[in-house]
Amino acid sequence: MSLFEEIINEKTITTGTVAFRMLLSLAVSVIVGIEREYHKQPAGLRTHVLISLGATLIMLLSIYIPQTFTQYSPADPARLAAQVVSGIGFLGAGAIMKFGFNVKGLTTAASIWVIAAIGLAIGAGMYLATAIAAGILLFALSFLNIFEKWMFPAKSIKHLHVYSAVGFELKTDPILTLLKKNQVNVQTIDIEQSFDEKRTNLYFVIQIKEKVKINKLSEEIGAIEGVQKVKLQQIV
């Protein structure tokens, strides 16, 4: 039996198993971290590497302590490792950010939780489970991301301000018809009437798909009779 096979099949914690499992943890977390960095996520390469290495080391300690200090038996190897599951929630929460009505970072928070679980599996010597979990994680982050965007186009929340010309009472129906034609969902409508300037301004909160051409939509709304100015801005 080769040295590599001995390390793979070794059940006790030795210098060889520690080195191999820590390096494997590094390799897996680097691959996942690079994917997160590529998508410009708040938790990237270094974060995933440190989480995975920490989880692997804690799992190794969980096995090593009862194995070495037999005078304190019975001991539960899972007690120390179990704290990783609850503790990793604080890091995951730090990756979640709220921008207006939008929440970002949920996927990265989930990947942080999964990479910690993979680190624990590596520390426990569950190499097949590690390979399967890492493969599914990369598939979910990369390929399912493309599939999700194709099946469920992303939408953003924006303010749409439509200002009427002086002396013109602007109606909502032509604008709503145009928005519906462009598959834009209207969440709220506010109407402001200025009696001094004799004009009517309309304020919409809309949910718009990424594929909708903002400039073209603004031009079409601006071409409606009585519209003097159109302003579209992202809600922050």
Image (tube, grey):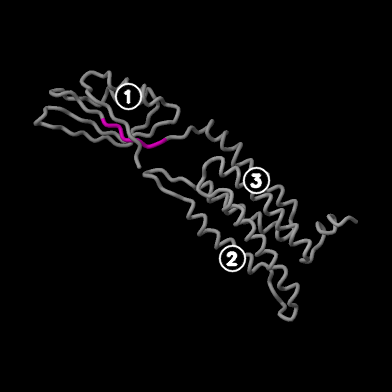
Task: Classify residue 36 as left or right of residue 27.
Answer: left
Please provide the residue range marked out in magenta: 156-161
Q: Residues within 10 Å of mark 3 (few under 14, many from 20)?
A: some
Q: Is residue 37 above or below residue 123?
A: above
In-front residue for pair 130/37: 37
Disc 3 + disc 2, Cβ < 8 Å: no
For the point 72% across and 48% down, the residue is 131
Task: Classify residue 198 as left or right of residue 88.
Answer: left
- Disc number lying in front (3 or 1): 3
> Which label sits on residue 114?
none
Going by the numbered disc 2, the residue's amino acid type is Gln
Q: Is residue 22 magenta?
A: no
Picture quadrant of residue 52: bottom right
For the point 21% across and 33% down, the residue is 191
Q: Is residue 125 above or below residue 235?
A: below
Q: Which residue is mark 3?
A: 31
Rounded to the nearest angstrom, the CA distance separating label 2 from label 1 is 53 Å
Q: Which residue is mark 2?
A: 83
Give the secondary structure at mark 1.
Answer: helix
Q: Earlier in the sequence, mark 2 or mark 1?
A: 2
Q: In x, y percent, where is residue 157?
A: 37, 37
In-front residue for pair 50/218: 50
Q: Is residue 160 magenta?
A: yes
Q: Which residue is mark 1?
A: 218
Task: Classify residue 42 as left or right of residue 164.
Answer: right
For the point 53% across and 48% down, the residue is 108
Going by the numbered disc 3, the residue's amino acid type is Ile
Q: In x, y percent, where is residue 210?
A: 44, 30
Give the secondary structure at mark 3.
Answer: helix
